[in-house]
Image (spheres, rainbow, N blue to C red):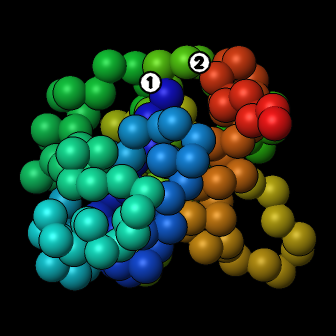
């Protein structure tokens, strides 16, 4: 299981995603270009003490990510085909989240293996990308038995 962010726009969301990945033991992939300068120093600053630049796999573009992705690419999108709770995740899935400002372009949407959505109340447009990732990743890890075990004192 991995979490992939397509051309993120907001560095704070990347930082929150890095923390999420670290806490749930899930690699984070960033498909560039980003809407902000992305450097090893920037990753360290965004991740705080939850990771270092080695924890993040950077891809210069969609084609490289697609080529290197070992399993299905499951896109979370408001244009999804089915609710994520009805979807059967697999341990090697890549959960893909689009740009905060624009989602993913049509060619990326069409190239994904699956498209799912998080149901929202009527009239609501979308959730924050990292909130969406936390909801999605938690369910995917639960379904596949990969959820970290709680610490026992």
| SS category of the residue bearing label 1 | loop
Residue at 83 percent of width and 80 percent of height: 123
Mark 1 surroundings: few (<14), some (14-19) or many (≥20) residues within 10 A:
some
Instruction: Residue lying at the far right in this picture: please name it.
Output: 121
Compared to 57, does 66 lie above or below? above
Badge 1 or badge 2: first in the primary sequence: 1
Q: Secondary structure at mark 2?
A: loop
Label annotation for residue 72? 1
Which quarter of the rendering shows the C terminus? top right
Q: Residue at x 77, y 43 (%)?
A: 83
Q: Nearer the viewer, residue 107 or 125?
A: 125
| Percent of width and height locating residue 108 | 33, 48
Q: Residue 103, located in which quarter of the rendered image?
A: bottom left
Q: Residue at x 57, y 47 (%)?
A: 23
- Mark 1 vs 2: CB contact within 8 A: yes
Q: Quadrant of residue 27?
A: top left
- Residue 66 in sight: yes
Question: Which residue of the protein is positioned furthest toward the front in this rendering?
Answer: 153
Horizontal relation, residue 151 to residue 95: left or right: right
Kindly identify which residue carries mark 2.
90
């Amino acid at each position: 299981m991995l979490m992939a962010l397509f051309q993120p726009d907001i560095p704070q969301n990347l930082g929150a995603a890095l923390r999420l990945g670290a806490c749930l033991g899930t690699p984070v992939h960033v498909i560039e270009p980003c809407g902000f300068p992305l450097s090893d120093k920037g990753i360290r600053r965004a991740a705080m003490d939850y990771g270092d630049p080695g924890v993040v796999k950077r891809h210069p573009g969609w084609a490289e990510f697609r080529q290197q992705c070992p399993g299905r690419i499951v896109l979370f999108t408001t244009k999804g085909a089915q609710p994520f709770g009805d979807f059967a995740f697999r341990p090697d899935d890549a959960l893909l989240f689009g740009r905060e400002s624009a989602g993913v372009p049509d060619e990326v949407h069409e190239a994904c293996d699956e498209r799912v959505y998080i149901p929202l109340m009527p009239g609501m447009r979308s959730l924050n990308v990292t909130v969406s990732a936390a909801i999605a990743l938690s369910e995917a890890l639960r379904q596949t038995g990969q959820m970290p075990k709680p610490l026992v004192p």
